[in-house]
Every structure is written in C-alpha cells, then in structure tokens.
Image (cartoon, rainbow, N blue to C red):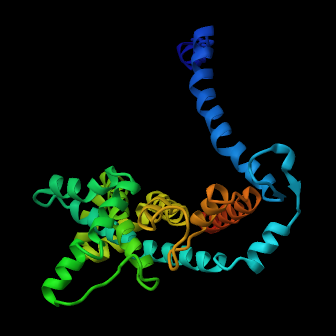
Amino acid sequence: MSSVRSAAPSTSRVPRPRRLGRGDRLFLTVIVGIPLLALLVFVWLPALASIGLSFTSWDGIYLSDIHWTGLDNYREILTNYPPFWPAVRHNVVWLLFTALLPTPFGIFLAYQLDRKIRFTRIYQTAIFLPMVLSLAVVGFIWEIIYNPDNGLLNGALNAVAPGHHIDWLGDPDLNLWAVLVASAWRHTGYIMILYLAGLKGFDPALKEAAALDGANGRQTFLRVVFPALKPVNIIILVVTVMESLRAFDIVYVLGGGVGSKPGMELLSLLITDNIIGETSHIGYGSALAVVLLVVSLAAIGTFLVQNFRKEDQ
C-alpha cells in the first residue's frame, strides 16, 4: 500500500498566471504603442508616400497640382538623367571601400584590444571618439584638413615636397576618395565597438582549446572566433550596407551644400537636389528615393536569405 500511495500523482495546484490589471495594460499599451506609432508616422507613412509620389509630377506646393505620370519618372531617370549612373557607381564604390577597408580594420582593432593589452581603455576612447561626433562635425573637421590653401594635409605635403598643391575636394578624380577617408575615420570606431561587444560575450575556453591544438592567433580568429560571432557579423554587414547607401551628411558638408559636385554624386544627394533644390521635383526625387530603397533592400535581403538558407541546410 505504501508503494501505491507513493506512486500517486501529486495533487498540488499549478499557480494560475496573474491577470493584468488596468494599470498594467495601460503601461504596456504606452511602451508598445508610442514607438509603434512613431515608426508608423516617421518611417512607414513617408516611405509609402514616397512610393506613391514617385509615379506623379508635383512641385511640392499645392496638392491639386499633383499629376499622375506613371512610370515616366523612372524612365527619365534611367535614360535621360546624366548624374544617375555616376551616382550609382559612386554608391557601389562607397560600399566596396567601406566593406573592404574600415570594416575589417575595425574588427582587427577590436580583436587586438580584447587581448587585454596595456592602455586598452585609452585606445578604445581615442578610436571611438569620432563616433561621438555627428557626420556633419566630422565633415567640418576634414574640411579644415583638406583646405587647399592652409589645410593640414597640404601643409604636411609642402613640408616634404615644396611647391605641391592639391585641391582634394575640387578635383573630380580625388574628391570621392577624400570623402571616403573621412567617413572611414568614423566608421572604423563604430565597427570596433560593435565587435568588441560581441567578443566580451565570447567563451574564452574556445580560444584556450584552439591554442592547445596548436592554432596561432590568426587561425584562432578565422576558424573559431569569427564563425562563432555570426550574429554580430550579420549586424556589422547590415550596418555597413546601410551606412554606405545612405551616406549624405559628410558628403553634403564637404561638397558645399545642395548640388552634387562632379565626382561626388550619390543617390542621397540627387534625392535632396530634386526635393529641396532650387526647383522642386517631388515626384522625380521620390522616384530616386524608391530606387535607393529597392537597392538597399535587395542588398540586405539577398545576404539574409542566403544566410538563413545555409542554416536550414
């Protein structure tokens, strides 16, 4: 009998979940509803409005002046808008440059600083400092450096080779690369902090096991650390693509405001020129914005689909 009784199931009650009160529901509604409303008002509605306006002709003054044009804006952009294809080419160059130089360099710095070298905190602060500044301020700093008359770069160049004078921002063959260097100065610190945060959560036992197997530092990073930080790698890739395609602030400052300089055309600048330039072409600018949106979604979506497909396999 004792064995039968001991085998009897327990009759203890499972506690019921507490029902949310009116205050709890109000709190959840506020903390979820306000960000959702802000996302809808400031992101999705303007995006949908831009898509709709891209099929129209409008000067941005009276709503009654909106006229449906169908695909004429897109046809004009692709066939009869000279700055468009240089802007696309420059955006691709910006993306490749950012992905191949400052992003790997930021990852390299993060891996080195994670090794507990001396003065790590000082190095982290110094490298991350440009990220604290806005891109507009960074643009002003590099405008002083690139000044053709008394800039720091030309001053150093004249000290080494007197008589040399380079217009870094006025030369169409150089100005894009000059802006890319300024952007990379800021982007490197951003990537370093992102990857350093991922490394802080990495299990050091995996490094120790790799060292016991005879792997050196480079092999440990490429075969152990880098694959294990796949979520961080995805975030860095998405950030790099978005930062490259939406580049505007620093180019706007170094380029002297609205109006794309030869050699510095970007899709974001063309959008601004057509929407808030001397003559507003809202439909034309909206069509350019839709093109940039499609390119961004295609670049990120393709990588994510391939990445998740590999995980499923």
Residue at the limit of the structure toward the left, as seen here: 118
Residue 78 left/right relative to 143: right
Quadrant of the rendered image containing residue 224? bottom left
Q: Residue at x 63, y 77 (%)?
A: 83
Q: Residue at x 88, y 62 (%)?
A: 69
Expressed as whole percent of the image width and height from the top left, the position of residue 132 reads 32, 50
Residue 226 left/right relative to 49: left
Q: Nearer the viewer, residue 114 or 77?
A: 77
Q: Nearer the viewer, residue 63 or 104?
A: 63
Quadrant of the rendered image containing residue 260? bottom right
Asked if residue 92 can be seen in this view, the reply is yes
Q: Residue at x 45, y 77 (%)?
A: 176
Question: Quick one: quadrant of the N terminus?
Answer: top right
Residue 215 left/right relative to 36: left
Asked if residue 223 can be seen in this view, the reply is no
Position of residue 120 relative to residue 172, above or below, is above
Expressed as whole percent of the image width and height from the top left, the position of residue 309 reads 65, 66
Q: Residue at x 45, y 65 (%)?
A: 256
Expressed as whole percent of the image width and height from the top left, the position of residue 138 reads 34, 59
Expressed as whole percent of the image width and height from the top left, the position of residue 73 reads 80, 67
Quadrant of the rendered image containing residue 78? bottom right
